[in-house]
Image: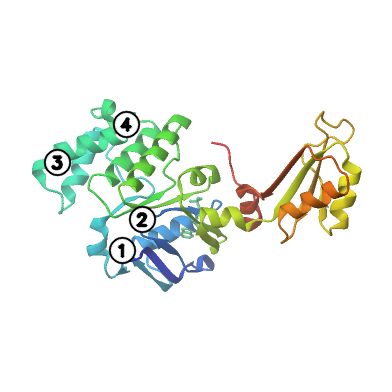
Amino acid sequence: MADFAIETQGLSKRFRSQLAVDGIDLAVPAGAVFGFLGPNGSGKTTTIRMLLGLVAASSGSARVLGTEMPGGVGRVLPRVGALVEGPAFSPFLSGEANLRRFDAADRGAPGRSRGARVAAALDRVGLSHAAGKKVHAYSLGMKQRLGLANALLMPRDLLVLDEPTNGLDPQGTREVRGLIRSLADDGTTVFVSSHLLAEVEQICSHLAVMRAGRLVAQGTLDEFRSAGDASVRVQTPDPEAARAVLAGLGLELEQAAGADAAAPPPGGALVVARLDERPPETVVAALVAAGVRVRGFEAAHASLEQRFVDLTGEGFDVVQ
Ligand SMILES: Nc1ncnc2c1ncn2[C@@H]1O[C@H](COP(=O)(O)OP(=O)(O)OP(=O)(O)O)[C@@H](O)[C@H]1O
C-alpha cells in the first residue's frame, strides 16, 4: 500500500474566470482520518470531485491509493467509498431498495450476499428501522445516513466524505463521528470535508485548511495545536507587580478575556502575556523572585479555533 492515500501536486480547477482550486499539494497519509476544513466556497467540494474523477483538473496531478487520476479511475473507485452531494436516490423506492440498486450496479459486489450487505450497511448507520420506508419520506439526516450506508456497502481502503453531518441533528452527528472512528480503527483512510472545526477536531488525526482555493496549512492535529502563539496566564492578587515583571521580561501584555479589573475574582486578577520562545518556568521563577503571589499559572497555545480564524481570516461555526 502507498504511504499516501491521496497525494496532489499543483492541483487546480478554473471555472471560467474563477480559480476555484489554486495549485494545492495535499498529502493524506494512509490510515489517517484527514479533516479537510474550510469556509463555504473555499474549494473543498471541487477538490473532492477532482480526486474522484467527477470533474477534470485544469492543471496539476492527483494520485489516489497510489494510482494516477483520472486515468486510474476504473481501478481506484471500487476501493473508494464516497459521499458527495448525496447520491441520486429514487424517492419512491425504499431505502433498502435504493441500496440494492446501487449494490447491483457495482460489478465487484456478489449478488448472493447482497441482502446481508445492504442490511449490515443500514444497521451501521442506524437506519434499519426505516429500511422499508420510501426515501421521499426520509428526513435530510436520514438521506445523509443512507448516502453513508451506500459508501459503506463494500469494504473500502479509502472513504471520501463531503460534509457527512450536513442535515444531521446533534445525536446523528455524534453517531456519524463514532462511525468514522470505528472505520478508521478498521484501517480505512477517511478524508472528510467540513466547515465545522469542532467536528473535525474530535475525530481527525490530520487537518488541512483551505482558504479561497488555496491550501493554507496541513499537518497533524498535534502540530496544529502547538503551532499557534503561546501565552501565559497568571492568577494573582498582585496584578500590577505581575504586569511589571512580565513587561520587564520583554513579554507583550494582553487583555485577559473575561477579566474584570474593577472586581478581581477572589483568587486574584488574571494577567495575560504573549509568551516568546522562553520556557514558561522561567516566567514563574521571575514572578516568585519579585515577590508576586502566584495563585494560578497556565502556559497554553492559542486555541485551535483561534488558529483557524488566523489562517482563514474568518470565524468557523464551532457550535454543533
Ligand atoms: N460548476 C461550477 N461552475 C462554476 N463555479 C463553480 C462550480 N463549482 C464550484 N464553483 C465555484 O468554485 C468555488 C469553490 O466551490 P466549492 O463548492 O468547491 O467550495 P466548498 O469549499 O466545497 O464550499 P461548500 O462548503 O459551500 O460546499 C465557489 O466559488 C463556487 O461558486
Separation of residues labelled 3 and 2 (CA atoms)? 27 Å
Task: Please identify, in this view, whether the residue under mark 2 or under mark 4 is nearer the observer.
Answer: 2
Horizontally, residue 228 falls left or right of residue 17, namely: right
Q: From this viewpoint, which residue is outermost toward the front?
A: 289
Horizontally, residue 19 falls left or right of residue 257, namely: left
Q: Mark 1 or mark 3, which is nearer the start of the sequence?
A: 1
Q: In which quadrant of the rendered image does the N terminus lie?
A: bottom left
How would you rate the neighbour count of disc 1 (Cα within 10 Å): few for under 14, some for 14-19, many for 20 or more?
A: many
Q: Mark 2 or mark 3, which is nearer the start of the sequence?
A: 2
Q: Residue at x 46, y 49 (%)?
A: 204
Q: Are circles 4 and 3 on residues that touch, CB within 8 Å?
A: no
Separation of residues labelled 4 and 1 (CA atoms)? 29 Å
Q: Which residue is mark 4?
A: 126
How would you rate the neighbour count of disc 4 (Cα within 10 Å): few for under 14, some for 14-19, many for 20 or more?
A: some
Q: Amino acid at mark 2?
A: Gly
In the image, is residue 297 above or below residue 170? below
Q: Amino acid at mark 4?
A: Gly
Q: Nearer the viewer, residue 135 or 259?
A: 259
How would you rate the neighbour count of disc 3 (Cα within 10 Å): few for under 14, some for 14-19, many for 20 or more?
A: some
Q: Which residue is mark 3?
A: 114
Q: Amino acid at mark 1?
A: Leu
Separation of residues labelled 3 and 1 (CA atoms)? 26 Å
How would you rate the neighbour count of disc 2 (Cα within 10 Å): few for under 14, some for 14-19, many for 20 or more?
A: many
Residue 31's disc is: 2
Residue 193 coordinates in the image, percent (x, y): 45, 51
Separation of residues labelled 2 and 4 (CA atoms)? 25 Å
Q: Which residue is mark 1?
A: 65
Q: Amino acid at mark 3?
A: Arg
Q: Mark 4 or mark 2, which is nearer the start of the sequence?
A: 2
Residue 266 coordinates in the image, percent (x, y): 82, 28
